[in-house]
Amino acid sequence: MKAKRLFAIDFGASGGKCFAGTFQGDAFSMQEIHRFSHEGVSFYVPDRTGEVTERTYWDDTLLYNNIVMGLQAFRRDISDNLDSIGIDTWGADGHFMSEDGELLGKVYCYRDHRLDNMIEVVKSRIDAKRVYEITGIHFHPFNLSNQLHWFVTNRGDSLGPGSFFLPIPSVFTFYLGGARQVDSAWASVTQLMDARTRQWSLEILDKLMIPFELMPRIVEPGAAIGELHEQLAATLGLNRASLMAVGSHDTASAFAAAPVSDPDEATIISSGTWSLIGKLVPEPITSMDAMHSGISNEGGIGNIRFLKNCMGTWIVQELRRGWRVEDGREMSWEEMDGPTRAAPPFCAMIDPDDRSFYNPASMSAAIDEFCSKTAQPKPGDRGSYLRTVYESLALKYRVVNDQICSACGKKSKVVNIVGGGSKNVQLNQFTADALGLPVLAGPEEATDVGNLMVQAMGLGIIDSMSGAQPIIKGAFAIRKFEPEDTAAWDKAYERFRKILTT
């Protein structure tokens, strides 16, 4: 049987990866083709009044060039024939384009401070309860509802006839093949899509003054949306491969790859820069209990990701970045593990979701300030900073897991951790200890696995995502962590709840 070759592009908020997936008969394999780091870049720019403000942008040129480099590597190392390409990204941001396909300015990063007060602005235009009833999405500064309302009220004069908006994954499918569509999994997180009809909510767009004609068409994951530009394919030495809509919010792809035996009994954590903690449910749950707990209903692949968006390893990434500036060199992740293990347990605790950790000038200073504010000792060394963050993340997972299980009425008996953070042995063990539940860690590249499986569904290689489960379980090693010393963690949990701010 002829092999089917698929290409997954995965852009996270701190790095990007390209994987090739091969289906041949009953066999599946995947191979990393290309990997790179990237981050938002801050500029200090005077506005029309002369006031200098910090503006944080993504480098879309760098990101696109790394897609090209990945496809070049595929052609060089794998084959000149490619069946499909799927792109997933972080779950925010996008940009407006002119009728001629020109970007209308730089691509803002979701941590940009222009969004700091936009939740309140949006709530002043439409009732928060009504927004949740329609979209099932909790209020976050980075929601596209905030971003698009800010743009039309502050940069609306740049929109000419024929202008259009592209979510961040669609920016790159547009570059590759002119495709403007977005899948329902990504559209669901914008706080602009009706969770039940899976189409843009005209009511919310109208209230936020966002013209409907600017928005891309929503399609289901697995839909073919175009093919490589003829000129680009020729330059790459490839055929005109199909562009497929996947679960292009990276969390949708990651959740799809979780090797869950019984969705009712499993909590899934997609662990990376953000921690997305939730359960798979068949329909949106928009109760007031869910709303007040800050739980969102995000579109999945034939289901709903009933989850909460929490801070993840962003805090550690920023500590590491600050130490890189101090030292003139970057500590390896392995180099950071030893001091973390050696540090005393529960020396201090933070609420990882406190607004002070969202985008501070200095993450270590932000932790110090939080400890002072909550009458705790400051971490005394790098190992203590790291242990404080990891322990606090695990304890916050317990809080969120309790909220989610209560809101959906289904108690979890196991935790599946997927994504890059599933490689973090210390955090995996802390999570098992804090929740008192066994943790199954892996696949590490869950986002790329889910991306490839949705492409396979779209190509007819598998019938449904349930058909992907035996393939995933057979192809990837899953590590198990059993709870230890739960009494000490129960005691720490009571202390942790007293310092929570959200």
Image (tube, helix red, strand yellow):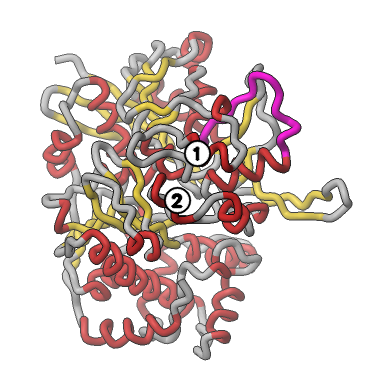
Q: Residue furthest right?
A: 50
- Residue 150 lies within the magenta run: no
10 Å neighbourhood of mark 2: few (<14), some, or many (≥20)? Answer: few
Residue sitting at 29 percent across and 47 percent down? 284
Q: Which residue is mark 1?
A: 203
Q: In the drawing, does residue 443 fall left or right of residue 128?
A: left
How many numbered marks, from 0 up? Answer: 2
Q: Which residues are magenta?
A: 155-167
Under mark 1, the amino acid is: Glu
- Residue 157 lies within the magenta run: yes
Q: In the drawing, does residue 111 fall left or right of residue 259?
A: right
Q: Residue 288: x and y, percent? A: 35, 61
Q: Which residue is mark 2?
A: 130
Tell me which corner region of the image, top left, top right, bottom left or bottom right, holds residue 31: top left
**Residue 422 in sight in this render:** no
Separation (CA) of disc 1 from disc 2:
10 Å
**Residue 205 in sight in this render:** yes
Image: 502 above or below 60: below
Mark 1 element type: helix
Q: In the drawing, does residue 23 fall left or right of residue 275?
A: left
Q: Residue 126: x and y, percent? A: 54, 50
Question: Is there a contact, CB below 8 Å, between mark 1 and mark 2?
Answer: yes
Residue sitting at 63 percent across and 58 percent down? 116
Residue sitting at 46 percent across and 71 percent down? 502
Under mark 2, the amino acid is: Arg
